């Protein structure tokens, strides 16, 4: 779903339009299921139908409580509400089974999310959630032989070059064959990439790791919500600048 459609549906749903709310729930059912599964994997638990129901209710709650002026992407907020409500549900279930020790919470990250039942506590948990996403991204980068420090060093200093590489990374993320060859470093499709992106083969080779790192984000926007939102903001800002210059 594109950003404009999402924003429109959220606005209408918060005004009380049930059709808009149902459309959001239907469109993001997979996102809800993936968020539930990811949380349960972290807790070393298997999913049952009850957990998915909790996730659906939590997503619906996120639609109601979302505040765009906070500057947090909606899906990031929704994911946080889902994790918070699942944590509460599982703790209650554990107490009911007299097995609370099996879900012992020992680290500050989960404690914060469990405590996020109140509005401000939930919004305050955003910073921790963003940090967790970046750690997840770092692990995935490592699998491709890239460190976050290296990525920062490789980031182009000039806005025009950065915007061109973001566009190229979007294409790379959409083309499975291109991505596979980039990821393995074997026989890069330089001519085809150059033709379709407008970048020279030399630039593509020089920024291979940077392009790959961005493409990873564009391939999984619902996993790397904050990072994807940041890249979209960079691209949008550059287009706005170009429009003003014109």
Image (tube, rainbow, N blue to C red):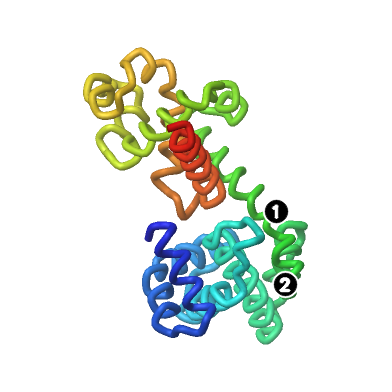
* Disc 2 versus disc 1: nearer the observer: 2
Residue drawn at the location 49% of the way across and 46% of the way down: 228
Identify which residue, 159 or 173, lies in the foreground: 159
* Residue 119 numbered tag: 2
What element does badge 2 sit on?
Answer: helix
Residue drawn at the location 63% of the way across and 78% of the way down: 89
Identify which residue, 3 or 227, lies in the foreground: 3
Percent x, y for residue 16?
50, 84
- Residue 65 in which image quadrant: bottom right
* Residue 128 numbered tag: 1
- Residue 34 in which image quadrant: bottom left
Query: Residue 130, relative to residue 150: is it above or below?
Result: below
> Which mark sits nearer the N-terminus, 2 or 1?
2
Query: Residue 177, relative to residue 44: is it above or below?
Result: above
What element does badge 1 sit on?
Answer: helix
- Residue 6 in which image quadrant: bottom left
Residue drawn at the location 56% of the way across and 64% of the way down: 79
């Amino acid at each position: 779903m594109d950003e404009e459609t999402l924003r429109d549906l959220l606005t209408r749903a918060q005004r009380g339009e049930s059709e808009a709310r149902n459309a959001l729930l239907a469109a993001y059912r997979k996102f809800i299921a993936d968020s539930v599964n990811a949380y349960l994997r972290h807790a070393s638990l298997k999913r049952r139908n009850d957990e998915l129901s909790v996730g659906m209710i939590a997503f619906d709650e996120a639609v109601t409580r979302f505040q765009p002026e906070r500057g947090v992407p909606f899906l990031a907020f929704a994911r946080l509400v889902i994790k918070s409500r699942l944590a509460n549900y599982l703790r209650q279930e554990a107490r009911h089974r007299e097995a609370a020790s099996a879900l012992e919470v020992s680290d500050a990250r989960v404690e914060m999310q469990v405590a996020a039942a109140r509005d401000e506590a939930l919004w305050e948990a955003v910073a921790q959630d963003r940090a967790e996403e970046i750690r997840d991204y770092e692990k995935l980068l490592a699998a491709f032989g890239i460190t976050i420090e290296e990525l920062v060093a490789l980031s182009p200093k000039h806005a025009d070059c950065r915007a061109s590489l973001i566009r190229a990374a979007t294409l790379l993320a959409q083309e499975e064959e291109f991505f596979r060859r980039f990821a393995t470093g074997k026989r890069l499709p330089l001519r085809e990439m150059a033709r379709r992106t407008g970048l020279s083969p030399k630039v593509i080779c020089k920024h291979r790791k940077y392009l790959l790192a961005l493409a990873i984000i564009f391939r999984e926007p619902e996993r790397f919500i904050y990072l994807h939102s940041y890249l979209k903001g960079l691209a949008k800002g550059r287009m706005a600048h170009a429009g003003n210059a014109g």
